[in-house]
Every structure is written in C-alpha cells, then in structure tokens.
C-alpha cells in the first residue's frame, strides 16, 4: 500500500504519569505506521488495559504492555479486529489516572468492546483518524498516547472532538453512501444514492413550495 498524502498528526491526551524507572519499556509506533494505516488491532484486558498490539499496513508491530513474567492479573484477549481500507478508528474513550484503566474504540462503522474496567474520573474522549500509538509500560500502561490525523469537514473546518461538528454533505456527495461525513471528506455518491438524495431534496422542496402556496391562499381569504 502506498503511503497516504501528508497530513497533520496531533497527539491526544497523555493518560497516566511520567515515570523515571529505567526498567519500564518505552514505545512509539510511528515507524511501523510509516504514513500508512491501521489494518488490525487486538487488546489484552483485565482490571486495566494490559496490552495492545496494532497491525499497520498488514504487518504486526511489537506487542506493548504486560511484558514482565511477574505480572499477575486476570486477563483475556479481545478478538482481533481487522479493518479494510474503507474502515478506520475515528473515536476513543479513555479512562485512567496513574495507569490507563480502560479504552473503548469506535470506527466509522462499528463500536469495539471496552477493554479494562472504566473509572469515573478522569475520562477523555478523542476523535479524528487514529494513526498510531506511543507510551510507557511495565505490567500496565504507565503512559499511553494516541496519535490522530485531523478530520476536516468539506468546508475545511477541523473536527475537534464533536462528531456533530460537520453539516451533512452537499447533494450529490456522501460518505459510505450516506450523509454521515465524520472523519472524511464527502465524495461523489453512487448513481443510486445520488438519485435518492436528489429525490428526497426535490420532495422537500416541493413540500415547502406547496406549504408556501397554501399559506398564501389562506391569507388571501382572511
């Protein structure tokens, strides 16, 4: 897969703390990402988010988290979630203080299971298009940061976290054959979808015209 065009990457909230312990492992998946895309992910869950492994461009990066044999915790892996080129992670909900307690990822098509046990505070919500991850870990994630490319509305306005921040696509354009455009530019619809959108718009226009005519006739007879 060819690298995507240059785009702005921004780091999300830093979950956890900044330990000095040299025995902890530091990681940054930017080299594995290499301006490509996340093609799969799996997570190890327990009381906290214990480990995660991300596949970039069809190749698995190193597993991060829960590396010490002395770590003990009830644990279970999520299923491996694969993403086609038309699917990407566009939202994350994270909780945690000293460690990363939980993470819930949502794509432009589905919501994945929560990994870890959420805490009430602090909580964070991030959005855009998830590109890669970085952090520090021992038994748990002492520090975790998600790195996003900024999503834009067709107008060029940045989406800064509110999935309702964009208006619907103009008539004749859509995303995934719908009017939902969060996380990507509007693109030309298929003929059937364009016709459907145009038909609905035409019907709405006709209804407004009929309402205006009816209201005008009513006023004449008052």
Image (cartoon, helix red, strand yellow):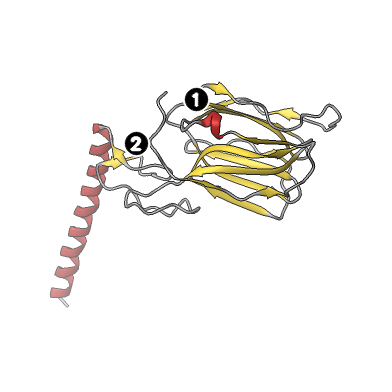
Query: Is residue 111 among what the camera can see?
Result: no
Q: Name the residue tied to disc 2.
A: 177
Q: Is residue 189 left or right of residue 126?
A: left
Residue depicted at 69% across the width and 31% down the height:
64
Q: Within the image, what quadrant is residue 191 found in? A: top left
Residue depicted at 83% across the width and 26% down the height:
69
Which quarter of the rendering shows the N terminus?
top left
Q: In this view of the protein, which residue sits in the foreground, 75 or 111?
A: 75
Seen from this angle, which residue lies furthest top? 59
Q: In this view of the protein, which residue sits in the foreground, 20 or 68?
A: 20
SS category of the residue bearing label 1: loop
Which badge, 1 or 2, comes first in the chain's sequence?
A: 1
Residue depicted at 34% across the width and 36% down the height:
177
Q: Where is residue 121 in the image (x, y as percent from the top left)?
A: 71, 55
Q: Where is residue 57 in the image (x, y as percent from the top left)?
A: 49, 25
Foreground: disc 1 or disc 2: 1
Q: Position of residue 9 (x, y in %)?
A: 48, 44
Q: Within the image, what quadrant is residue 113 found in? A: top right
Residue 109 is tagged as none
CB under 8 Å between discs 1 and 2? no
Q: Position of residue 129 (x, y in %)?
A: 48, 41
Which quarter of the rendering shows the C terminus?
bottom left
Q: How many labels does the image show?
A: 2
Mark 1 crowd level (few <14, some 14–19, many ≥20, 10 Å Cα): many
Q: Name the residue tied to disc 1.
A: 57
Mark 2 crowd level (few <14, some 14–19, many ≥20, 10 Å Cα): some
SS category of the residue bearing label 2: loop
């Amino acid at each position: 897969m060819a690298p995507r065009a240059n785009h702005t990457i921004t780091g999300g909230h830093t979950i956890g703390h900044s330990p000095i312990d040299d025995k902890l492992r530091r990681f940054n998946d930017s080299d594995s990402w290499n301006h490509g895309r996340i093609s799969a992910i799996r997570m190890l869950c327990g009381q906290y988010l214990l480990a995660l492994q991300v596949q970039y461009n069809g190749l698995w990066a190193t597993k991060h988290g829960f590396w010490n044999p002395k770590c003990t915790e009830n644990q279970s892996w999520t299923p491996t979630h694969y993403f086609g080129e038309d699917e990407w992670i566009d939202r994350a909900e994270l909780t945690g203080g000293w460690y990363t307690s939980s993470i819930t990822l949502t794509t432009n098509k589905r919501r994945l299971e929560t990994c870890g046990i959420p805490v009430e505070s602090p909580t964070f919500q991030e959005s855009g298009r998830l590109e890669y991850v970085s952090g520090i870990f021992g038994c748990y994630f002492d520090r975790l940061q998600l790195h996003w490319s900024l999503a834009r509305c067709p107008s060029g306005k940045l989406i800064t976290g509110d999935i309702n921040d964009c208006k619907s696509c103009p008539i004749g354009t859509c995303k995934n054959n719908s009017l939902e455009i969060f996380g990507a530019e509007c693109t030309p619809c298929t003929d059937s979808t364009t016709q459907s959108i145009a038909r609905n718009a035409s019907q709405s226009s006709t209804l407004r015209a009929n309402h205006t005519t009816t209201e005008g006739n009513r006023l004449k007879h008052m």
